[in-house]
Image: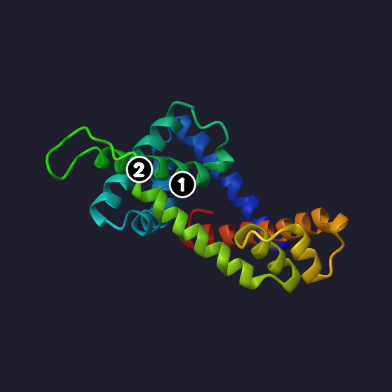
Amino acid sequence: MASEIQWSETCSGEHARLVERIRSGDRRAEEELVERFSRGLSLMLRRLARDPALAEDVYQETFRTVLAKARAGEIREGERLAGFLRGTARNLLLAEWRQGSRLDPEGDAGRVPAEDPPQLRQVLRREEAGLVRRLLREMRFERDRQILVRFYLSEDTKQEICADLGVEVERFKGVLHRARERLRELWEHAEKRQRFAEGLG
């Protein structure tokens, strides 16, 4: 864990220096940014877009946008460069989905289907739901898993959960809070592993 934190801090410092070099007009730094994040960004976009052509378009537009902002000094926190790239890519992809959703396949241009969220949001929601289910299975304590599933998913009452799990009603709020915190820690570790795998950590 200590080495992982140190590695992350080192990368953050390198990213901040990279952004500063780009702002100063260093063309080689721009090439380094693309080289460093190219593979991870491409993997992320192909996974989310499910359309190689769309993924390639957004990939190119992401680097164009980020480099322009770096040159203009608009990236305030260079150490968060990886997150800025991810956020820019997702926003651009969402914009592409929204633009596409305005075109009616029967030729009725301009109609926006209000009942359906953008397709990318559906993909992200499914991925997040799948991750939550997996993390719940990984939780160390069965009581944590039971209380979260029953309170948030099954919508059992506090009294029912306390009676079944042997928890005093007045302690329920604290037990629920600690279970949520442990799930949040698992979530953060999972996100960090995903960023490292994509090369965008």
Kindly identify which residue carries mark 1.
86
Kindly identify which residue carries mark 2.
115
Find the residue positioned furthest to the left.
Answer: 107
Q: In front: mark 1 or mark 2?
A: 2
Please state which of residues 2 and 181 is positioned toward the viewer in this rendering: 181
- Identify the image quadrant of residue 145: bottom right
State which quarter of the image contains the N terminus: bottom right
What color scheme is it?
Answer: rainbow
Residue 152, above or below 146: above
Q: Total number of numbered labels?
A: 2
Q: Amino acid at mark 2?
A: Glu
- Identify the image quadrant of residue 78: top right
Q: Is residue 141 visible?
A: no
Residue 111, above or below 14: above
Residue 105, above or below 66: below
Mark 1 residue crowding within 10 angstroms, few (<14) / some (14–19) / many (20+): many
- At x 15%, y 36%, the residue is 108
User: What element does badge 1 sit on?
Assistant: helix
Mark 2 residue crowding within 10 angstroms, few (<14) / some (14–19) / many (20+): few
- At x 59%, y 62%, the residue is 190
Q: Amino acid at mark 1?
A: Arg
- At x 44%, y 41%, the residue is 29
Question: Percent from the top left, x then y, of residue 132?
Answer: 57, 62
Please state which of residues 151 and 65 is positioned toward the viewer in this rendering: 151
Question: Percent from the top left, x then y, of residue 200?
Answer: 49, 53
State which quarter of the image contains the C terminus: bottom right
* Distance from Cα at disc 1 to Cα at disc 2: 27 Å
Question: Percent from the top left, x then y, of residue 165?
Answer: 79, 70
- Identify the image quadrant of residue 184: bottom right
Residue 154, above or below 101: below
Q: Is residue 46 visible?
A: yes
Label placed on residue 36: none
